[in-house]
Amino acid sequence: MERRLILMRHAESAWKTLGGSDHDRPLTPQGSSDAPKVATHLVALGWRPEAVLSSDALRTRETWAQMSQAIPKAPEPLFAPALYLAGLEDIWSEAHSVNPSVETLLVLGHNPGWERAVFTLSGLDKVMTPATAMLLIGSGDDWPSALRGKWSLSEVIRPPDTED
């Protein structure tokens, strides 16, 4: 079965928070603006996520909250602590919870793990600035097996690409 993976880095977040931890960094106004633009672009390309796996950090939660407003019938996300500052092995572990009927999966998280995951899956060394979405195509009977295979990069979406 063909699988479509949207591997996305959270939108721009505030580096300086008052006494907060890295895990609790919120989005900046720019990040809050960029996230729905990326979501609108995904929908326009026909890449509407059927399921969402996300880090449980505040900035990924806020990214999804902004994106979900622009996605018709947005799925309920699974916010997984294991995806905070994670990599491909952690994505693979969490993918066991994704229904095998899901064809398009959005995985929302952080660098440097996401850039390494793109490289491992596709063999391409890509930079993921905030709110970058890598659209990858692969195949497999279920998500864990698909994530063990080779993927091709279909498209890269960055916030400036989505502005009018």
Image (cartoon, helix red, strand yellow):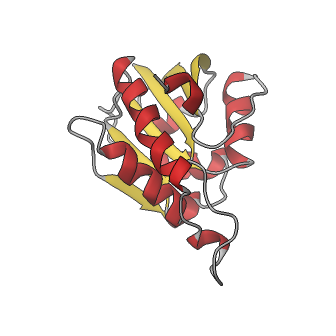
Residue 164, relative to residue 108: is it above or below?
Answer: above
- Tally the marks: 0
- Would residue 143 be found to the left or right of residue 8 on screen? left
- Residue sitting at x 43%, y 60%: 79
Query: Is any atom of residue 62 visible in this view?
Result: yes
Which picture quadrant has residue 75?
top left
- Where residue 146 appears, x then y in whole percent? 52, 29
- Residue sitting at x 41%, y 50%: 64
- Where residue 109 appears, x then y in whole percent? 57, 50
Q: Which residue is most to the bottom? A: 19
Query: Is any atom of residue 158 visible in this view?
Result: no
Residue 43, relative to residue 99: is it above or below?
Answer: above
Residue 74, relative to residue 82: is it above or below?
Answer: above
- Front-most of residues 40 and 101: 40
**Location of the N terminus (image quadrant):** top left
- Front-most of residues 143 and 24: 24
- Front-most of residues 104 and 11: 11
